[in-house]
Image (tube, rainbow, N blue to C red):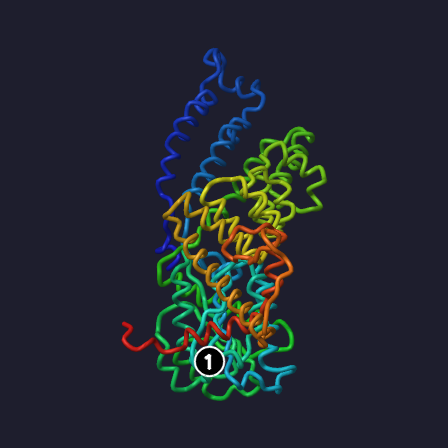
């Protein structure tokens, strides 16, 4: 009864298409009901005996089948809905922020090899299960810090995940509520609701009261063999669904179910409805099949064409007959979009004709240098921004800075380019500082005298400027010379973030 009372159409204006359908159907239907000429001169009992196929007139005609199928398709397009949406996209693709506990107890070895290493293993497995869903990473102990903002490319997140340890945190403690606040800020910038997963071995009982009642969906993967009563209290009072770690993937499945149910409850509270119009495609398709009841060749052709259009692309199909058929109906960019949606990025890069879409597929495939080269001649702000992303991911920070600056010249209002430019400059400044410190340590002893055996213009002091436009080979060589560990980078940044503001600052 609640489903009946809650029935609605998500796009009711599309129901107006039923009016022209009815206007077309009535004239086509009318001739079949007209009396044949001259039948008025034949006695009714003789007419019934002489008429062939009289009962067939009572059956549905081709026009009836066509317009019945069209009416069902119109109803499907209008979006019939009567149940709450389980999630905005499904759990695997909804934004997820993982909050990793880095308190000292995570180094204990009662869970092999350690609690922290088991937690990292589970995070890697969860990311692999999410099939490209956006993931962010937060680390917390006494303070909470952003490790990686939400990204759909986990390859940039994994090196920083491996670098996390309690030794890089500025303060001891277990401020899970601070991690939730930081995660909520990240998810608030997303168009669709997301969730937060805590990976921890416990909770500070005094911190439970700091958890708000609302906010994003939340769950916790507990890596402690004896979580204690505080975990149960946390789950009851703060709405955090807790799941104990296991040696197989059952704990990850439980985490996904917990987050899915939380997202479904959030969808119900916000009044979002699931679009169930797809269900009407089945009867509409069955009606269309009656068109081909005569002629095996027609039925076979319809089946082959339907399979070519409906089946998702795959490398096996790409070289087969089905791909040849789909080429008749899809443009190269449409075929590339289908491969891209199926997460087959190498095939998508081959199929796309649009260079920007091809570059995006190459970036998804990890070929950042190729993507940057493809975007280089395209002088639009979006293309230069994406080129900067590709260069930064290939660790050509100087080239990335130049690309972001080009994007801002083409569109000064590109806020994302401005933010990434500032981040890239900070990375370059940090790496330059590390390089200078290394040079100072290596040359701590100052020579008594410096003699140059070159004169005139034969020798000039040379210095590679990180802000200069470097060639790809020079940039790669420079980056190798100043390479530093992600753990050192994160430790320095966390310490800066946790430091108290200077006296007199607002």
Nearest the camera: 142 or 32? Answer: 142
Q: Is mark 1 on a helix, strand or loop?
A: loop
Residue 310 position within the rendered picture, expressed as x and y whole percent measured from the top left: 60, 42
Q: Where, by quadrant of the figure, is residue 11 drawn?
A: top left
Quarter in which the N terminus is drawn: bottom left
Residue 44 position within the rendered picture, expressed as x and y whole percent measured from the top left: 49, 19
Nearest the camera: 389 or 98? Answer: 389
Q: Where, by quadrant of the figure, is residue 108 drawn?
A: bottom right
Q: Say above or below: 99 vs 71.
A: below
Q: Say above or below: 47 vs 398.
A: above
Quarter in which the C terminus is drawn: bottom left
Residue 337 position within the rendered picture, expressed as x and y whole percent measured from the top left: 56, 43
Taking the spot 69% from the left edge, 42% from the top edge, the residue there is 318
Q: Where, by quadrant of the figure, is residue 309 drawn?
A: top right
Nearest the camera: 264 or 432? Answer: 432
Q: With 141 as the anchor, is 358 left or right in this view? A: right
Q: Mark 1 points at which residue?
A: 170
**Residue 120 visible at all:** no
**Residue 136 visible at all:** yes
Residue 220 position within the rendered picture, expressed as x and y whole percent measured from the top left: 49, 75
Q: How crowded is mark 1: few (under 14 residues within 10 Å), some or many (20 or more)?
A: many
């Amino acid at each position: 009864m609640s489903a009946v009372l809650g029935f609605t159409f998500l796009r009711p204006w599309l129901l107006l298409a039923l009016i022209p359908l009815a206007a077309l159907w009535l004239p086509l239907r009318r001739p079949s009901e007209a009396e044949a000429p001259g039948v008025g001169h034949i006695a009714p009992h003789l007419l019934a005996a002489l008429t062939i196929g009289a009962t067939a007139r009572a059956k549905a005609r081709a026009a009836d089948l066509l317009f019945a199928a069209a009416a069902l398709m119109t109803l499907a397009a209008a979006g019939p809905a009567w149940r709450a949406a389980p999630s905005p996209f499904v759990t695997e693709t909804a934004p997820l922020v993982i909050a990793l506990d880095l308190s000292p107890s995570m180094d204990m070895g009662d869970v092999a090899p350690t609690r922290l290493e088991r937690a990292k293993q589970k995070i890697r497995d969860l990311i692999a299960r999410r099939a490209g869903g956006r993931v962010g990473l937060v680390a917390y102990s006494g303070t909470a810090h952003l490790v990686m903002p939400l990204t759909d490319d986990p390859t940039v997140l994994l090196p920083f995940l491996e670098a996390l340890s309690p030794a890089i945190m500025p303060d001891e403690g277990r401020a899970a509520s601070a991690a939730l606040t930081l995660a909520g800020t990240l998810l608030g910038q997303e168009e669709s609701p997301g969730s937060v997963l805590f990976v921890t071995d416990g909770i500070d009982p005094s911190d439970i009261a700091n958890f708000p009642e609302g906010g994003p969906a939340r769950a916790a993967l507990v890596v402690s063999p004896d979580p204690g009563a505080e975990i149960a209290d946390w789950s009851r009072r703060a709405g955090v669904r807790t799941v104990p770690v296991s040696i197989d993937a059952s704990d990850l499945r439980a985490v996904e179910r917990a987050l899915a149910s939380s997202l479904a409850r959030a969808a119900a509270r916000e009044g979002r409805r699931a679009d169930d119009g797809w269900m009407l495609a089945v009867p509409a398709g069955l009606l269309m099949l009656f068109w081909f009841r005569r002629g095996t060749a027609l039925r076979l052709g319809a089946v082959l064409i339907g399979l070519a259009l409906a089946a998702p692309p795959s490398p096996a199909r790409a070289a087969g007959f089905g791909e040849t058929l789909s080429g008749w109906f899809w443009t190269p960019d449409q075929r590339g979009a289908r491969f891209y949606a199926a997460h087959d990025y190498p095939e998508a890069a081959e199929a796309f004709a649009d260079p920007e879409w091809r570059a995006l597929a190459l970036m998804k495939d990890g070929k950042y240098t190729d993507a940057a080269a493809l975007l280089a001649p395209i002088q639009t702000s979006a293309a230069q921004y994406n080129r900067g992303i590709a260069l930064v991911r290939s660790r050509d920070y100087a080239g990335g800075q130049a690309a972001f600056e080009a994007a801002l010249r083409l569109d000064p209002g590109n806020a994302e380019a401005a933010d990434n430019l500032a981040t890239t400059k900070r990375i370059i400044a940090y790496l330059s500082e590390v390089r200078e410190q290394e040079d100072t340590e290596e040359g701590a002893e100052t020579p008594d005298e410096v003699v140059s055996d070159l004169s005139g213009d034969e020798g000039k002091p040379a210095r590679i400027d990180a802000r200069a436009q470097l060639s790809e080979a020079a940039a790669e060589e420079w980056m190798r010379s100043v390479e530093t560990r992600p753990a050192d980078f994160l430790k320095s940044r966390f310490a800066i973030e946790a430091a108290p503001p200077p006296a007199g600052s607002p």
